[in-house]
């Protein structure tokens, strides 16, 4: 047997093996795509068998040589185009043109008397070369648009079509130029073998090859799973898992539906929101990986799944961790037949890994909740101990002072009242009252109910009246104001803010130093500032002084009484008015507290 014959037989054998493989698969699962594959390889097998019968075995079957072999060969281009259509979109017009061309070519072969003219044979070869070149181009284009295993299969299909086209070109040149050397025919046979090998891996890839092609994406998926749980939002985790699963299976998209135990529904993320699926897919109901092909044949739950994804093939697997049902992973493709039965094991593996990521995410969330609860308890305890500590000082003063006054009255009932002692008692009681009111305000603030009814007032007039009421204590406070500066405020609460800022300015500055309150307008806001020439606030403390119980590090507790709640309450009041409060200060250089609240014009 010559080398040429060996090559020919090898490629024939290959094509026949592929035909048998796809035939078995089609009998098991007769999807339209599998039928198309069987037709294509069946026709190739027909060409091979009929050629062998007529040329090698030399059976005298004229109708086989004249009709069957050429008609089958002409149909190849069209059948290959049907395979393209199973994976990607083919314009109707192209389909129609190829069908018409095929019928016309077959008619010409059947009706023309023998022998066929060289021109007709060449014309047929050109028709086939063009159709198969289009098929090769369409497979290449689809390879660019897909990824993973599907891309590799499309690349193989494109290479197979290119080789087949070259076989025809070589044969065509052989007809036109009969004097070519025998090596020319060997080239044709080698190309035939190559096209058979490419089609084999494209349309009937063995499981080991699929696995090898899928490996890079599967490894990338498995590697990312451990770090995914750290993403800030469960939506991001789900999205990354979907991307990874689609890439691993070489499909355009994937969806993860999460189980919601309260509503007993699967939910998917749509526009960032959780939307319940109106049905429970079969893979979920049966809790096993399922490959669903062709929407039309499906029972309602899976038909809905197809509609939802605009898909023709869906492969799904339940996501379960330690017996707990977490959700469902579905990978889908708008065109069959992207998936193989062997992908069921793979999707289950991916779903199990997705379960690890989702479970880790849930554990991280749970840990954060526990930490938040602990933090809340710690804050409550801090609050109680700080409050108790701060209340104790004035209360002890009151008790001691009252005891002194009582002893004095017992010793000498006729003695005149101790005015100084009574003043001290009053002062301590006043301090106690302020502290208790502050505590009440904190609790109201935290329930969001600090602000009552608002009214439109002139802030300049409001502050002027306050200064007048506290004339003795506020004797070094100076007001600079534009008249009128209108704002819509809860009057007693806004007075509380101003009093707090002014009292702090007086408390934290030397006894003679002036305190200035300035009120003015700026676009959209009424503005107020309270400036002192006191101890100032270190920059690290400037944002923190508005937090609960925070006192700046340059404040000596024994010299300046206080609980660190006044500014926290002031900020709450200002913010509930839609405004802002902040401080500009430097240690030893005084402080300026700034307030901005939305301005109201009279018009
Ligand atoms: P308190 O004055 O009762 O400690 P505040 O909440 O009113 O509580 O103030 C918090 C902290 O901000 C004070 O302890 C002090 O460290 C700092 N602070 C507030 N106002 C001034 C100011 N005018 N000058 C310097 N430090 C101030």
Image (cartoon, grey):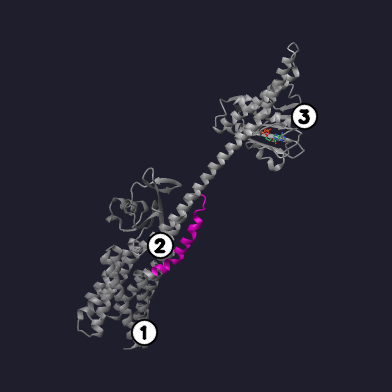
Pointer 2 residue: 249
Q: Quadrant of residue 297?
A: bottom left
Q: Earlier in the sequence, mark 3 or mark 1?
A: 1
Q: Secondary structure at mark 3?
A: loop
Pointer 3 residue: 514
The image quadrant where one finds ligand 1 is: top right
Please tell me whether residue 214 belongs to the stretch shown in magenta.
yes
- Residue 573: x and y in percent read 60, 31
* Gap between marks 3 and 2 measured at Cα: 76 Å
Q: Secondary structure at mark 1?
A: helix
Q: Earlier in the sequence, mark 3 or mark 2?
A: 2
Q: Residue at x 57, y 31 (%)?
A: 443
Q: Which residues are magenta?
A: 209-232
Asked if residue 83 is positioned above or below residue 315 in the image, the reply reads below
Q: Nearer the viewer, residue 353 or 231?
A: 353
User: Which label number is shown at residue 186?
Assistant: 1
């Amino acid at each position: 047997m010559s080398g040429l014959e060996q090559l020919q037989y090898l490629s024939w054998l290959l094509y026949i093996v592929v035909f048998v493989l796809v035939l078995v698969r089609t009998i098991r699962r007769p999807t339209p795509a599998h039928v198309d594959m069987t037709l294509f390889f069946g026709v190739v097998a027909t060409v091979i068998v009929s050629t062998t019968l007529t040329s090698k075995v030399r059976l005298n079957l004229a109708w086989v040589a004249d009709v069957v072999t050429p008609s089958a060969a002409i149909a190849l281009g069209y059948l290959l185009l049907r395979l393209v259509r199973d994976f990607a979109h083919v314009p109707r017009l192209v389909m129609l043109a190829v069908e018409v061309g095929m019928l016309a070519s077959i008619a010409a072969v059947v009706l023309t008397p023998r022998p066929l003219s060289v021109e007709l044979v060449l014309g047929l070869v050109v028709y086939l070369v063009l159709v198969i070149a289009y098929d090769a181009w369409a497979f290449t284009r689809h390879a660019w648009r897909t990824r993973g295993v599907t891309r590799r299969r499309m690349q193989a299909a494109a290479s197979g079509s290119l080789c087949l086209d070259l076989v025809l070109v070589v044969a065509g040149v052989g007809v036109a130029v009969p004097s070519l050397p025998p090596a020319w025919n060997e080239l044709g046979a080698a190309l035939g073998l190559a096209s058979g090998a490419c089609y084999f891996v494209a349309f009937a890839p063995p499981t080991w090859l699929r696995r090898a092609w899928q490996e890079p994406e599967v490894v990338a998926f498995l590697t990312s799973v451990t770090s995914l749980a750290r993403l800030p939002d469960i939506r991001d985790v789900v999205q990354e898992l979907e991307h990874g699963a689609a890439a691993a299976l070489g499909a355009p998209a994937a969806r993860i539906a999460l189980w919601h135990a309260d509503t007993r529904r699967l939910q998917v993320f749509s526009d960032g929101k959780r939307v319940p699926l109106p049905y429970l897919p079969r893979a979920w109901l049966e809790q096993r990986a399922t490959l669903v092909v062709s929407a039309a044949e499906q029972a309602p739950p899976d038909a809905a799944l197809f509609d939802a994804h605009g898909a023709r093939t869906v492969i799904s697997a339940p996501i379960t961790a330690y017996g707990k049902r977490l959700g469902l992973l579905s990978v889908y493709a708008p065109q069959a037949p992207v998936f193989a039965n062997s992908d069921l094991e793979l999707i289950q593996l991916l779903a199990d890994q997705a379960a690890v990521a989702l479970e880790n995410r849930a554990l991280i969330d749970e840990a954060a909740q526990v930490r938040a609860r602990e933090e809340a308890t710690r804050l409550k305890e801090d609050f109680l101990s700080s409050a108790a500590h701060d209340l104790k000082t004035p209360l002890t003063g009151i008790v001691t002072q009252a005891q002194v006054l009582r002893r004095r009255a017992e010793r000498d009932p006729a003695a005149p009242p101790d005015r100084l002692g009574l003043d001290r008692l009053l002062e301590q009681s006043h301090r106690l009252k302020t502290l208790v009111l502050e505590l009440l305000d904190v609790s109201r603030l935290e329930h969001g109910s600090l602000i009552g009814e608002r009214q439109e007032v002139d802030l300049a007039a409001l502050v002027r009246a306050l200064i007048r009421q506290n004339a003795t204590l506020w004797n070094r406070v100076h007001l600079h104001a534009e008249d009128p500066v209108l704002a819509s405020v809860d009057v007693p609460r806004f007075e509380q803010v101003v009093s707090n800022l002014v009292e702090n300015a007086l408390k934290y500055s030397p006894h003679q130093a002036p305190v200035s309150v300035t009120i003015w307008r700026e676009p959209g806001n009424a503005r107020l500032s309270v400036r002192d020439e006191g101890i100032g606030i270190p920059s690290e403390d400037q944002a923190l002084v508005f937090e609960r119980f925070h006192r700046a590090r340059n404040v000596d507790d024994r010299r300046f009484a206080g609980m660190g709640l006044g500014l926290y309450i002031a900020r709450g009041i200002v913010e509930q008015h839609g405004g802002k409060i902040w401080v500009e200060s430097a240690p030893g250089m005084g402080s300026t507290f700034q307030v901005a609240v939305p301005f109201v014009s009279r018009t």
